């Protein structure tokens, strides 16, 4: 496991608000992104609903803010780019450890304007490129000691588990859910091209084969404690550490 590097695909920070704020989608997005993007799109709906999205970091990342009553999501998605052979790869190949802190640093700029929250979640999706399905299952096996995988005679394996753990950030009892989902995937994308007769054609292209993990670390829905701004920063750091621990050590109590 020590030699494997999980490449970041996306991150998500979710804040469950105890009140329904009036979202300032454009202002919040710019505060997190640092500046307005040329591609920024803002939508405002009924009270409590709003969204903003745009490309940042030299158009390599899609940053998206989604607001609805009781929930605010910040999504950070690394874009895909085409290769000369027609396949698609992540436009930026960096480890989760390298990129998660920069994402959370952006989110920390918004926390002073966050509404009162009683629940926080941090999600991430990551991959390890593999040459074959069997290699992918062997990668999974090294991270999943609780199960036995047959890499040759098995297919379509998906394993999900929650390993709750008590928070170390608070004096009162607070259980943190540590949900992880593991599998091997090959994603096919469709690109549009123009034929010689000027008609549009759809071309299927693969993004390769990879072992994949999706992680969701969150405080429980039953919590009725309203986090202060300092507590939100503390719990986000703890969620970050628990996510990285799973990526480094696999499924562990």
Image (spheres, helix red, strand yellow):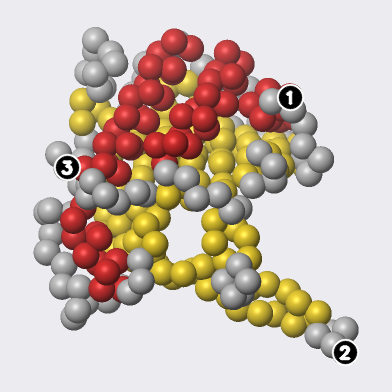
- Reading the chain from its start, which is encountered first: label 3 or label 2? 2
In the rendered view, tell whether residue 118 sits above or below residue 181: above
Q: Which mark is residue 197?
A: 2
Of residues 45 and 87, the one nearer the viewer is 87
Image quarter for residue 243? top left
Task: Tell me the residue that label 1 is attached to.
Answer: 27
Give the foreground label among 1 and 3.
Answer: 3
Classed neighbour count for the residue bearing mark 3: other residues with Cα under 10 Å, few (<14), some (14–19), many (≥20) = few
Q: Quadrant of the C terminus?
A: top left
Residue 217: x percent and y percent? 35, 36
In this image, 219 relative to 92: left or right? left
Image quarter for residue 97? top left
Task: Tell me the residue that label 3 is attached to.
Answer: 252
In the rendered view, tell whether residue 245 sits above or below residue 200: above
Give the foreground label among 2 and 1.
Answer: 2
Residue 140: x percent and y percent? 24, 59
Of residues 103 and 92, the one nearer the viewer is 92
In this image, 224 relative to 22: left or right? left
Residue 133: x percent and y percent? 31, 73
Asked which secondary structure carries label 3, the reply is: loop
Asked which secondary structure carries label 1, the reply is: helix
Residue at the spot 68% in from the left edge and 72% down from the top edge: 191
């Amino acid at each position: 496991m020590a030699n494997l590097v999980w490449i970041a695909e996306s991150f998500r920070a979710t804040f469950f608000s105890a009140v329904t704020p009036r979202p300032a989608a454009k202002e919040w997005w710019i505060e997190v992104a640092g500046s307005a993007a040329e591609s920024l799109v803002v939508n405002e709906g009924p009270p409590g609903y709003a969204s903003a999205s745009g490309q940042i970091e030299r158009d390599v990342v899609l940053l998206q803010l989604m607001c609805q009553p009781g929930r605010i999501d910040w999504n950070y998605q690394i874009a895909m780019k085409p290769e000369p052979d027609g396949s698609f790869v992540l436009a930026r190949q960096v480890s989760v450890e390298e990129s998660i802190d920069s994402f959370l640093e952006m989110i920390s700029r918004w926390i002073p304007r966050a509404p009162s929250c009683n629940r926080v979640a941090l999600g991430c999706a990551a991959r390890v490129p593999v040459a074959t399905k069997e290699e992918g299952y062997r990668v999974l096996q090294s991270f999943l000691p609780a199960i036995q995988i047959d890499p040759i005679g098995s297919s379509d394996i998906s394993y999900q588990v929650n390993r709750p753990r008590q928070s170390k950030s608070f004096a009162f009892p607070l259980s943190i859910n540590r949900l992880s989902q593991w599998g091997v995937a090959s994603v096919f994308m469709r690109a549009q091209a123009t034929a010689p007769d000027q008609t549009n054609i759809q071309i299927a292209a693969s993004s390769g084969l990879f072992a994949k993990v999706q992680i969701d670390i969150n405080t429980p829905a039953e919590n009725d404690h309203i986090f202060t701004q300092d507590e939100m920063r503390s719990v986000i750091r703890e969620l970050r550490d628990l996510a990285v621990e799973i990526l480094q050590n696999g499924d562990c109590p």
